[in-house]
Amino acid sequence: MDSASGEAPPPPQPTSVEAPPPSGSSAPATSAPAPTQPEGSSPAPLSRYESQKRRDWNTFLQYLQNHRPPLTLARCSGAHVIEFLKYLDQFGKTKVHVTGCPYFGHPNPPAPCTCPLKQAWGSLDALIGRLRAAYEENGGRPESNPFGARAVRTCLREVREGQAKARGIPYEKKKRKRTTMTVSAVSSGGGSSSAVAATSGGGDSGDTIIGGGVGSSASLASTTTATANVTTTTV
């Protein structure tokens, strides 16, 4: 029965940003509503790379569950990773000509053929890179990472070389740009100078070259060391 002296407090209004309570717990009707999150505090959306890495990781875990016999992540080795790469070939879209095909080694075949479709080497190489990072992000140790095994690297290299011959498209490594930094040093004695050029990048050895200027035969250490004169007075 309603009271004339006062009214019952209204029930708390639910909000759209409030997280659902955990299963098995119930809050009383008289409890205060949880504070709402301010606008703009939602987590930032994942990047394209992170989203793709998560999808690849879930696909690999599903592959382990469907494996016969079932395989756990702790027992996964480089051989199982290679099996996974071969399993993905059935979803490939890259035409890889076999040895007996008349278009073997032809980059632009004039007519279709019955050669199988496989995963391109570039796609497999990027996939292994994402799975290798996801393995360590999910608690795996770097020294036991099956995606970084030598057998996997060998498999990728064989796929790259095989597809390059079959498709007539060589895969060349990108050359790194060389950057040269020159530092000039003047000796404390005056008159002589030397130049030090340090080269980095590319496939060079990156040796240090000392030369140039007058008196360039002087060592670098002597150009930066001052000579102290000591006078002794006898009484």
Image: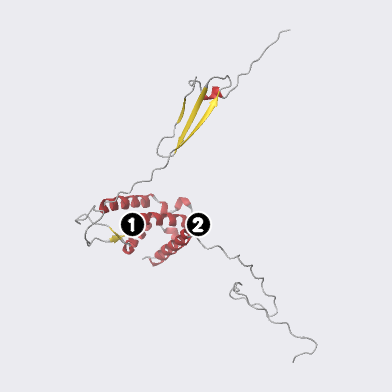
> In the image shown, does 59 or 100 lie closer to the viewer?
100
Image x and y of residue 150, in percent: 38, 49
Q: What is the crowding at mark 2: few (fewer than 14 residues within 10 Å), some, or many (at least 20)?
A: few
Viewport quadrant of the C terminus: top right
Alpha-carbon neighbours of circle 1 within 10 Å: few (<14), some, or many (≥20)? some
Q: Position of residue 123 (x, y in %)?
A: 37, 57
Three-letter residue code for mark 2 = Glu
Report the front residue among 119 and 88.
Answer: 119
Rendered location of residue 97, percent (x, y)? 24, 57
Is 51 drawn above or below residue 204 in the view shown? below
Name the quadrant of the N terminus.
Answer: bottom right
Looking at numbered disc 1 in the image, what kind of residue is underneath it?
Answer: Ala
Q: Residue at x 39, y 67 (%)?
A: 66
Q: Quarter of the image holding residue 228?
A: top right
Residue to which mark 1 is pinned: 120
N-terminal-most mark, 2 or 1:
1
- Nearer to the camera, 104 or 186: 186
Given this view, does label 2 or label 1 mark the residue nearer the observer? 1
Secondary structure of the residue carrying tag 2 is helix
Give the alpha-carbon distance from disc 2 to disc 1, as whole Å. 26 Å
Q: Secondary structure at mark 1?
A: loop
Q: Residue furthest right?
A: 5
The quadrant where residue 117 appears: bottom left
Question: Which numbered marker is on residue 216?
Answer: none
According to the picture, the residue beneath numbered tag 2 turns out to be 137
Q: Residue furthest bottom?
A: 1
Q: Position of residue 200 (x, y in %)?
A: 45, 37
x 78%, y 86%: residue: 6
Compared with 233, 159 (above or below) is below
Whether 173 is drawn above or below 41: the answer is: above
Residue 39 versus residue 146 in the image, above or below? below
